[in-house]
Amino acid sequence: AKKWINIRKLYGNFYKVPRNQTKLTIMLEKLGMNYDGRPHSGLDDSKNIARIAIRMLQDGCDLRVNERIHGGQLMTVSSSAPLEGAPAPQMPRYRN
């Protein structure tokens, strides 16, 4: 793969949160989700990242390629169209 979507970067930009709040467990917690599976399991991490991506789509995020490899160097892919952000995720409110 030479192009991909860095979910951590997209999450931080979309929800306007600092980089230190884009760890997988923190992102899930802020979205009101629990980590499913075993930590550091590639398959379980992937499934949890997919759950975050689905939630971001539901919140109106436009998932776009934002990183690529060119000449062996990691490069940020910028978009000509500005991305509109959403308010920071809130824990779901439960009705009694």
Image (cartoon, helix red, strand yellow):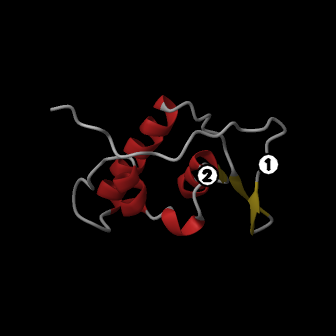
Q: Which residue is mark 1?
A: 78
* Residue in the image at 61% along x and 56% along y: 9
Q: Given this view, does label 2 or label 1 mark the residue nearer the observer?
A: 2
Q: How many marks?
A: 2
Tell me if mark 2 has few (under 14), some (14-19) or many (20+) residues whose alpha carbon lies within 10 angstroms of its own: some
* Residue in the image at 54% along x and 57% along y: 8
Provide residue 22's location: percent of width, then percent of height.
Answer: 50, 61
Tell me if mark 1 has few (under 14), some (14-19) or many (20+) residues whose alpha carbon lies within 10 angstroms of its own: few
Question: SS at mark 1?
Answer: loop
Tell whether label 1 touches label 2 (CB within 8 Å). no
In this view, 30 is above or below 39: above
- Tell me the CA gap for discs 2 and 1: 17 Å
Provide residue 44's location: percent of width, then percent of height.
Answer: 29, 55
- Front-most of 13 and 36? 13
In this view, 77 is above or below 71: above
> Which amino acid lies under the numbered mark 2 shown in the image of this protein?
Lys
Q: Earlier in the sequence, mark 2 or mark 1?
A: 2
**Picture quadrant of residue 24:** bottom left
Question: SS at mark 2?
Answer: loop
Residue 37's mark?
A: none
* The C terminus: image quadrant: top left
* Residue in the image at 76% along x and 69% along y: 73
Q: Which residue is mark 2?
A: 16
